Amino acid sequence: MGTGGIHSQADEFWALANGCPKEQGLVSVVACSDGCFRAGEQGVQAVLATRDGKVEFIQFADRVLAYVKSALGYAAYYPLHPVALAHPVQAVLMDLDGTTVRSEGFWINMLERTVRALRGDADFRFAPGDQPYVAGHSISEHLQYCLRYCPGAGLDAARACYHDQVRGALRAIAEGDGSCMAFAPAPGLKAFLLGLKEMGVKVGLVTSGLYEKAWPEILSAFRAMGMGDPRDFYDAIITAGQSPRHREPGTLGELECKPHPWLYAETGRIGLGIDFAERNAVVGIEDSGAGVIALRLAGFPTIGLAGGNVVESGTRGLCQYFCNSLGEAFEIIRG
């Protein structure tokens, strides 16, 4: 468990990046993969990368930049803002899959079904090494990765196939075939949420998933907890929007999902109305490396939650705290 008192952004980053055991932290690399920055040149002190290679950090004496790569060709640079959790906490931002709802296995299975359909191979299974690339990012990023198993298939065909698989599965759940347990609430979720409300803390729910994917999860979890309509509880719910289909409009969401900061930034600033200057009174909870980076790039102190891929991705050192349960996270928030 770490704390977030900061004096120098570069010193804070270096300490966090190197404050974990080697197997849990970021990896030193010679240069940024786009060739723009190299350690020891142009004032660059070091270049570090997440263990899944999705994000690279360029450390200067007084600042840190994050280079978020894109499998779809739309990479971006962002500043890594200093953070220090301030009490009383005004708001909590929570990830959906893995943090709020235990459903990651279900959605990975949807990707597996998509690959099986595209390959015509009913026995296909992901290998353990595929895990960091089929969870925590946008659907298009996941499908782009899956195409390595589908020679000759394109992203558009993969996306159409995926949505067919998802609609079929969600329809089966709605018809009561028992699969709704795929959307079970995370352990301790009800007590955690009610405790936040009792403290007067605003709660925002944030997911890289499309609305059609995310809403059944949220609704199923709240029904299981007997908490009614999620819209009556959450102060803001932000998803990756609607997927465009033939002759139907879509909404912006696929290219700027986690680890980009925009979903969390929009939830905090627009959904909850909290000014950027007050961001240290907002804390985010994430179980994925992509989510941890999204929160940090949005400028929010971060609690990493065990059970996802925070450790495996090398981003544990970027969390101000790391907890094994929502109960532990609640104690930090309560102060």
Image (cartoon, rainbow, N blue to C red):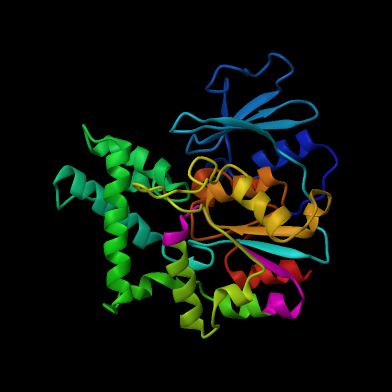
Q: Position of residue 120 (x, y in %)?
A: 13, 46
For the N terminus, the image quarter is bottom right
Q: Residue furthest right?
A: 7
> Which residue is situated farthest in the front direction here?
247
- Asked whether residue 1 appears in the rendered view, the answer is no
Q: Is residue 40 visible?
A: yes
Specify whether 165 is left or right of 312.
left
Q: Is residue 151 magenta?
A: no
Which residue is more in the foreground, 253 or 19? 253
Q: Quadrant of residue 43?
A: top right
Residue at left offset 53%, top offset 67%: 100
- 291 up-or-down from 18: above or below: below
Compared to residue 317, the image places residue 154 above or below, namely above
> x, y (%) of residue 64?
72, 32
Relative side of 89 to 166, left or right: right
Q: Tell me which residue sits at (51%, 30%) in the image.
A: 74
Q: Quadrant of residue 174?
A: bottom left
The number of callouts visible is 0
Q: Is residue 14 above or below residue 166?
A: above
- Location of residue 12 in the rendering, given as x and y in whole percent from the top left corner: 76, 40
Residue visible at 70% across and 53% down? Answer: 320
Which residue appears farthest toward the top when viewing the image? 41
Q: Point out the image quarter for the C terminus.
A: bottom right
Which residue is at a point 80% across and 53% down the rendered structure image? 275
242 or 323: nearer the viewer: 242
User: Residue 14: where, in percent of width, then height?
Assistant: 71, 36
Magenta stretch bounds: 195-212
